[in-house]
């Protein structure tokens, strides 16, 4: 017998087929694109989420042949959050989904903050007011898509849209509801004050159902499309970062996830919501009674891709080879990965990326090493902020693209106080979803046991003391230079605002 964990992400959908012992036996993938019709606008055709789900599931189950309809007994979802759209009474899209990267609702975000107060909204939702979240988006839709809103049956994000396709019920879970900035994370219900201020009617929103709860069996049309049986049981899923958290067995305080993709994401576990002046994002964990503390470092993996594609023009494999050989030659070259402004915990939108310390003795691969170091130093600064806010970091579990670079993973290890572990399975979000399904199917007694069976963490070998000390010396130089740069941009920003 098997279960499926399905991750409906930003650029594609993945599916893992897992047997009753927790062994990943097959996987599938189907990609899709983004549409950028204007400045700050990033849309997606929600129907592609469903067609890609069908393709990924069929690919993962291809080896089962006709037995798939009998042998797959349960599934669950991991999904991107805050990519939302209006649908009609039958669940059909009335327009494109406005993704979590869409920034068109900036004016509305300012109006929302003015109406309720930015701190009030942060304390309710766990998220700083922004145009990419749904409270501001529904205000934009009311202003600019009034005809569609008048015909709307629901205002859904990715999880609910696919759940409706699967079982006919457009339910959401608390982790996804929180990132829509319409739920009070203290009560677990849609917040009346935010709904009133944003003009979002309660009936537009789906029912909030706990992650892992049984929500129904496959509709006949869904079963036929997926090549599965109508008896397949569907369990409610969660936001992709929280599924990755579960898929990495990060369920207790002291554990923290570092997901290294285009953005690097830190997600820790706390006993209560962690609100900070640096805007760490608290939200409900999938483990009831616990919370996550999330922050994104926006231009991390993106910083290296920017430098590689714009200035090197080589493959990642060639870059890795040169970076390893260049070890020790980059000296005191420093890089600040502020391509879209100073990130966590500085939050300085006017700041821009910079190299310091370049000399005639340096080449482009020395600069590349500095980029990789700068990204890791940004992570180290963020971990210091977590600790300063009373959030312990004892074990960091690492996943994502950085694992392809021994140099980068070594840098991370040398800059973390505590144990660093790497995950054997790269698709941790799928693992988290599969854990919901596996427990529901009776394969395991609890989600953590299921996740550990599917995805085993492996401790990295400790680095040398000399390497750790060298990393600390360079980090401190980077920190001091970063404070000076931040002061420069702060003074420039003050001068600009004063002249308006």
Image (tube, helix red, strand yellow):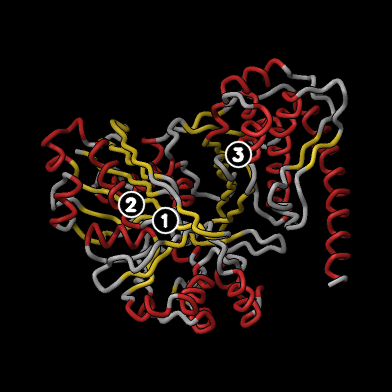
Mark 1: secondary structure: strand
Disc 1: which residue = 44
Query: Disc 2 vs disc 1: Cβ atoms closer than 8 Å?
Result: yes
* Horizontal relation, residue 150 to residue 378: left or right: left
Mark 1 to mark 3 CA distance (whole Å): 23 Å
Query: Disc 1 vs disc 3: Cβ atoms closer than 8 Å?
Result: no
Looking at the image, residue 260 lies above or below residue 41? above
- Name the residue rendered at 41%, 35% in the picture: 455
Mark 2 to mark 3 CA distance (whole Å): 26 Å
Label placed on residue 100? none
Q: Where is residue 93 in the image (x, y as percent from the top left)?
A: 32, 65
Disc 3: which residue = 301
Q: Position of residue 344 (x, y in %)?
A: 70, 53
Q: Where is residue 427 in the image (x, y as percent from the top left)?
A: 42, 38
Figure quadrant of residue 259: top right
| Total numbered circles | 3
Q: How many residues crowd around disc 3 within 10 Å: few (fewer than 14), some, or many (20 or more)? A: many
Mark 2 to mark 1 CA distance (whole Å): 8 Å
Query: Viewer-proximal residue, 457 or 474?
Result: 474
* Horizontal relation, residue 14 to residue 105: left or right: left
Disc 2: which residue = 48
């Amino acid at each position: 017998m098997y279960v499926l964990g399905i991750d409906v992400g930003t650029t594609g959908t993945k599916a893992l087929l897992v047997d009753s012992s927790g062994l990943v036996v097959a996987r599938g993938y189907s990609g899709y694109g983004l549409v950028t019709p204007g400045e700050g606008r990033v849309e997606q055709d929600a129907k592609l989420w469903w067609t890609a789900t069908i393709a990924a599931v069929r690919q993962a189950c291809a080896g089962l042949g006709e037995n798939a309809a009998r042998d797959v007994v349960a599934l669950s979802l991991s999904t991107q959050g805050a990519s939302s759209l209006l649908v009609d009474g039958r669940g059909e899209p009335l327009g494109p989904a406005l993704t979590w990267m869409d920034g068109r609702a900036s004016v509305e975000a300012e109006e929302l903050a003015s109406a309720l107060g930015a701190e009030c909204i942060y304390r309710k939702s766990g998220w700083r007011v922004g145009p990419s979240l749904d409270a501001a988006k529904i205000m934009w839709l009311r202003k600019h898509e009034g005809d569609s809103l008048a015909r709307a049956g629901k205002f859904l994000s990715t999880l609910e849209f696919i759940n409706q396709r699967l079982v006919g019920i457009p339910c959401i879970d608390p982790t996804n509801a929180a990132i829509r900035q319409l739920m009070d994370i203290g009560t677990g219900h849609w917040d009346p004050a935010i709904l009133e201020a944003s003009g979002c009617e309660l009936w537009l929103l789906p029912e909030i159902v706990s992650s892992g709860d049984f929500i129904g069996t496959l509709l006949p049309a869904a079963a036929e499309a997926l090549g599965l049986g109508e008896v397949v049981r569907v369990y409610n899923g969660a936001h992709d970062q929280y599924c990755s958290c579960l898929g990495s067995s990060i369920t207790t305080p002291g554990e923290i996830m570092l997901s290294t993709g285009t953005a690097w994401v830190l997600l820790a576990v706390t006993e209560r919501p962690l609100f900070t002046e640096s805007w760490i994002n608290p939200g409900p964990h999938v483990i009831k009674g616990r919370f996550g503390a999330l922050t994104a470092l926006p231009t991390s993996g993106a910083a290296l891709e920017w430098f590689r594609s714009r200035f090197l023009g080589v493959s990642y494999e060639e870059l890795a080879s040169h970076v390893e050989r260049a070890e020790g030659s980059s000296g005191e070259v420093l890089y600040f990965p502020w391509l879209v402004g100073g990130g966590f915990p500085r939050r300085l939108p006017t700041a821009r990326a910079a190299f310091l310390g370049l000399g005639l003795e340096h080449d482009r691969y020395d600069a590349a090493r500095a980029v990789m170091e700068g990204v890791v130093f940004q992570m180290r600064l963020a971990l210091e902020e977590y600790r300063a806010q009373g959030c312990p970091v004892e074990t960091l579990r690492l996943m994502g693209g950085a694992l392809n670079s021994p140099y980068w993973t070594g840098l991370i290890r040398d800059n973390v106080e505590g144990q660093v572990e790497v995950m054997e399975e790269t698709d941790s979000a799928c693992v988290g979803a599969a854990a919901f399904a596996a427990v529901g199917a009776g394969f395991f007694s609890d989600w953590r046991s299921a996740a550990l069976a599917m995805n085993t963490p492996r401790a990295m070998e400790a680095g040398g003391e000399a390497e750790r000390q060298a990393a600390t010396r360079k980090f401190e130089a980077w920190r001091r230079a970063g404070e000076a740069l931040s002061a420069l941009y702060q003074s420039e920003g003050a001068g600009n605002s004063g002249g308006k």
